[in-house]
């Protein structure tokens, strides 16, 4: 199991000093790294508590997950943001793309309060054979509770007194609506550690319980995270600690080279949702006080044909991270007997073409002096995904010290939630409703009929 980080193409000696980083700039952070490293080790019992998750005992979760997977044909997660993106990422990265066609339990996520999506899931599942995992650390997330309320009504009408047997809650162990309701109705409750924020919770029961239900080896997932924690805990040198290296290269690119956009571009369909998870982690943690990079999702080779024109020839405001998979479980060779005009493809495999496309894209970006990093893994596996998850969690936490902000809160998100509560008529939010009415005007409009 191997992960490699190639940062050659962010360095000034490759792409020049205007866009690239001087090695002495990296090394100038050595004292900062030593001091911050010591602070992080002390904070693993508090703000950096996510670093404790790889060492949890998984036996109870695995036993309960096995029971659920044997009893039900459908497993539906009701949650949004940090309560759903991690589980979705693990499912799409580590299970077959055709899982919901051939295997069980079939997995669906009710995240958005979009009635089209909600109804499409209800059309597919059999309520009597479905387990619903309701995930919300606060126990009060509007979208989650709204979807749950409808599902609850359906369960009661269809199943009578057995409705609670089809529910599992993942929430705070001490407070919140889901905790109270679950205890009052004898519903199984899994706990989100109070010191772990939603976007850092994928290695808690939030992510590993759904993963275990779907047959993913969560012990190997956590072993990979342990390995990355060991490396990041021991190494204090910026060029030896992968999390600090990613954080500092992005920080310098952002604050000293004007790279306000961080593009992540895996050359693997199965890693597409890893970028969705990364986007929340990077944006919600670091977008504060007028600081932070905008994370953008791309997919190789698809977005070579839709985005690379902008990345090479548009504003020089981007740093790009490629993710490469070196080996595939399956591959397909292009036959020898093909038309002469395309005979140059003969004998090559799809995987080989994918990787050569990546090399060609990197060369084009180097030519245009666009900084880019490549993270390579020998294969997609629970162990490697565990390493990758922990790598970016630690890089994000370390970045908070670089920007001098708290990477573990999200005050701007809370403001939007408070306005929503006011608009929905929640008690205690009347002043917020008044503020909304003062702020929100529809003065300039155009209507086409």
Image (cartoon, rainbow, N blue to C red):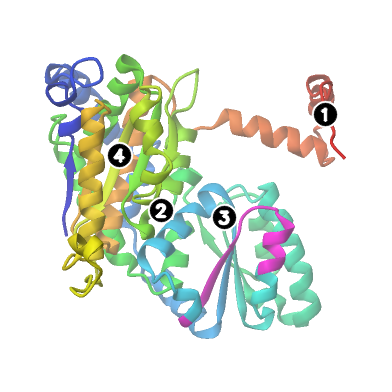
Would residue 188 be counted in the magenta stretch?
no
Of marks 2 and 1, the one in the foreground? 1
- Quadrant placement of the C terminus: top right
Q: Secondary structure at mark 3?
A: strand
Q: Give the labeled residue for mark 2.
A: 272
- Mark 2–mark 1 Cα distance, whole angstroms, equals 37 Å
First reached walking from the N terminus: tag 1 or tag 4: 4
Q: Residue 54 at what x, y percent from top left? A: 31, 54
- Mark 1–mark 3 Cα distance, whole angstroms, equals 44 Å
Callout 2: few (<14), some (14-19), or many (20+) C-alpha neighbours within 10 Å? many
Residue 143's tag is none
Q: Residue 337 at what x, y percent from top left? A: 21, 75
Of marks 4 and 3, the one in the foreground? 4
Q: Give the labeled residue for mark 1.
A: 446
Of marks 1 and 3, the one in the foreground? 1
- Which span of residues is magenta-colored? 102-120
* Quarter-of-image position of residue 322: top left
Q: Is 253 placed above or below 41 here?
A: above
Q: Is 166 placed above or below 222 here?
A: below
The answer to whether 288 appears left or right of 16 in the picture is right
Q: Give the labeled residue for mark 3.
A: 171
Mark 4 vs 3: CB contact within 8 A: no
Q: Is residue 225 visible?
A: no
Q: Give the labeled residue for mark 4.
A: 321
First reached walking from the N terminus: tag 4 or tag 2: 2
The answer to whether 88 appears left or right of 350 in the picture is right
Q: Secondary structure at mark 4?
A: strand
Of marks 1 and 4, the one in the foreground? 1
Q: Is 255 placed above or below 225 here?
A: above
Of marks 3 and 2, the one in the foreground? 2
- Mark 4–mark 2 Cα distance, whole angstroms, equals 13 Å
Mark 4 vs 2: CB contact within 8 A: no
């Amino acid at each position: 199991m191997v992960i490699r980080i190639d940062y050659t193409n962010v360095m000034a000696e490759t792409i020049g000093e205007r866009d690239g980083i001087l090695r002495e700039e990296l090394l100038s952070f050595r004292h900062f790294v030593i001091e911050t490293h010591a602070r992080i080790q002390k904070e693993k019992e508090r703000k950096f508590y996510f670093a404790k998750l790889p060492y949890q005992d998984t036996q109870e979760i695995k036993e309960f997950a096995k029971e659920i997977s044997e009893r039900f044909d459908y497993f539906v997660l009701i949650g949004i943001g940090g309560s759903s993106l991690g589980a979705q990422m693990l499912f799409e990265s580590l299970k077959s793309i055709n899982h919901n066609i051939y295997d069980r339990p079939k997995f669906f996520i009710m995240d958005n309060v979009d009635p089209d999506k909600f109804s499409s899931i209800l059309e597919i599942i059999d309520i009597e054979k479905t387990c619903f995992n309701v995930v919300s650390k606060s126990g009060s997330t509007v979208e989650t509770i709204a979807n749950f309320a409808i599902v609850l009504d359906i369960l009661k009408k269809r199943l009578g007194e057995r409705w609670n047997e089809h529910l599992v809650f993942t929430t705070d162990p001490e407070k919140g609506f889901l905790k109270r309701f679950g205890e009052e109705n004898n519903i199984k409750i899994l706990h989100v550690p109070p010191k772990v924020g939603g976007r850092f919770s994928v290695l808690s029961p939030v992510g590993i319980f759904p993963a275990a239900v779907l047959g993913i080896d969560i012990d190997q997932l956590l072993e990979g995270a342990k390995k990355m924690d060991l490396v990041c805990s021991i190494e204090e040198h910026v060029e030896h600690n992968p999390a600090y290296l990613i954080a500092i290269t992005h920080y310098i690119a952002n604050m000293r080279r004007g790279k306000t956009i961080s593009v992540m571009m895996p050359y693997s369909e199965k890693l597409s949702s890893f970028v969705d998870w990364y986007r929340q982690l990077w944006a919600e943690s670091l977008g504060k006080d007028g600081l932070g990079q905008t994370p953008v999702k791309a997919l190789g080779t698809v977005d070579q044909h839709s985005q690379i024109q902008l990345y090479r020839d548009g504003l020089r405001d981007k740093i790009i991270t490629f993710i490469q998979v070196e080996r595939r479980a399956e591959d397909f060779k292009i036959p020898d007997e093909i038309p002469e005009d395309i005979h140059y493809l003969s004998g090559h495999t799809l995987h080989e073409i994918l990787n050569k496309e990546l090399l060609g894209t990197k060369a084009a970006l180097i030519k245009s002096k666009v900084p880019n990093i490549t993270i390579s893994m020998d294969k997609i596996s629970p162990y490697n995904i565990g390493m990758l998850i922990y790598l970016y969690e630690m890089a994000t936490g370390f970045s908070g010290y670089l920007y001098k902000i708290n990477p573990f809160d999200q005050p701007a998100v809370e403001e939007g939630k408070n306005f929503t509560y006011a608009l929905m008529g929640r008690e205690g939010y009347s002043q917020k409703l008044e503020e909304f009415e003062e702020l929100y005007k529809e003065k300039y409009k155009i209507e086409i009929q």
